[in-house]
Image (cartoon, rainbow, N blue to C red):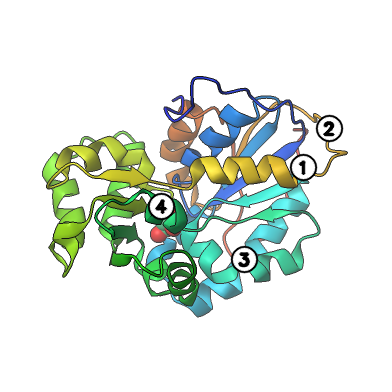
Amino acid sequence: MPTDSLPPNFVPSPARGRVLVFDSGMGGLTVAEEIRALGPALGIHYSADSAFFPYGDKSDEALTARLPAVAKALCDRVRPDVFVIACNTASTLALQEVRAVLDIPVVGTVPAVKPAAQLTQTGTVGLLATPGTVRRAYTAELISNFARDIEVVMHGSIELVKLAEAHARGEDLPIEAFEAAQAPLFEAPGGDRIDTVVLACTHFPLVRAQLVASAPRPVSYVDSGAAIARQTIRVLPPESEARGIGGHAWLTSSPEDVPDLALVLRRYGFPNVQRVPDAPIEITSAPTAL
Ligand code: DGL
């Protein structure tokens, strides 16, 4: 599934090293794709806290308590050079808490408010995210720093997260489902002026085509995937070396869930899937060679 956002004069980075991408589910695969396109010599691995999916409707307390423990356990196991939280819901809440327990660079994902504010012609931007990201102080601060003169209309949808995850698993979903999931954004006060929509959840680029097809009128959809990829290469410690080719994935799901998710992961270049126990996350089996 190649990324379609590469400019014609694109030159891949020669950077080497091990990167661990993390999300609640399959949304972070959209970010992993961007990192792979920019850094084809990196060893990229994937991890998902799929037992706790979706993050977007969980309490701040539950997520803040869980995220550092999950991140630490995964990094102790995988020993990456960089940990990428490919999840807006987690990053806008607990980036500092995760950084505090890791001794490697941690890249977070935040809504692409700044590029959207530069792109809009009407001066009204839509922000489609999880309910968690919509209510975050971090998101409000981002808007006041980078979109002060822009009207930002927000909508949080867990339904759209679930549709994107189901789509990734290969389910055939009617286009009306996507239309209904994004309609509240365009129907909110000011929604009729939106010309640019921030996909502020990494799951949503998985269904970009469905969103484009079911929008009430043509609008631009922007996400932060390419910016996260650039930041990952930027913070990679200079001494990082190639250590395998990547392609492993870790899930916290129950065993019944793993086969379906493993099929998705295989399609995205992560054929070696293992399960890790649910919270409190403890990795007990012996590490496999990566
Ligand atoms: N993919 C995640 C994000 O970017 C969250 C989806 C969820 O688990 O609710 O916010």
Type of amino acid at the residue the image marks with label 1: Pro
In this rendered view, identify the residue nearer to me: 204 or 267: 204
User: Which residue is labeled 3 in the image?
Assistant: 95
**Given this view, does label 3 or label 4 mark the residue nearer the observer?**
4
Type of amino acid at the residue the image marks with label 3: Leu
Residues at marks 3 and 1, CA–CA distance in whole angstroms: 26 Å
Q: Which mark is residue 39?
A: none
Label 3 Cα crowd, 10 Å radius (few <14 / some 14-19 / many 20+) = some
Residues at marks 2 and 3, CA–CA distance in whole angstroms: 26 Å
Q: Residue at x 66, y 44 (%)?
A: 232
Type of amino acid at the residue the image marks with label 4: Gln
Q: Is residue 176 left or right of residue 86?
A: left
Q: Is residue 32 left or right of residue 216?
A: right
x and y, in percent, of residue 14 in the image: 73, 25
Label 2 Cα crowd, 10 Å radius (few <14 / some 14-19 / many 20+) = some
Residues at marks 3 and 4, CA–CA distance in whole angstroms: 26 Å
The answer to whether marks 3 and 4 mark residues whose Cβ atoms lie closer than 8 Å is no
Q: Earlier in the sequence, mark 3 or mark 1?
A: 3
User: Which residue is labeled 2 in the image?
Assistant: 241
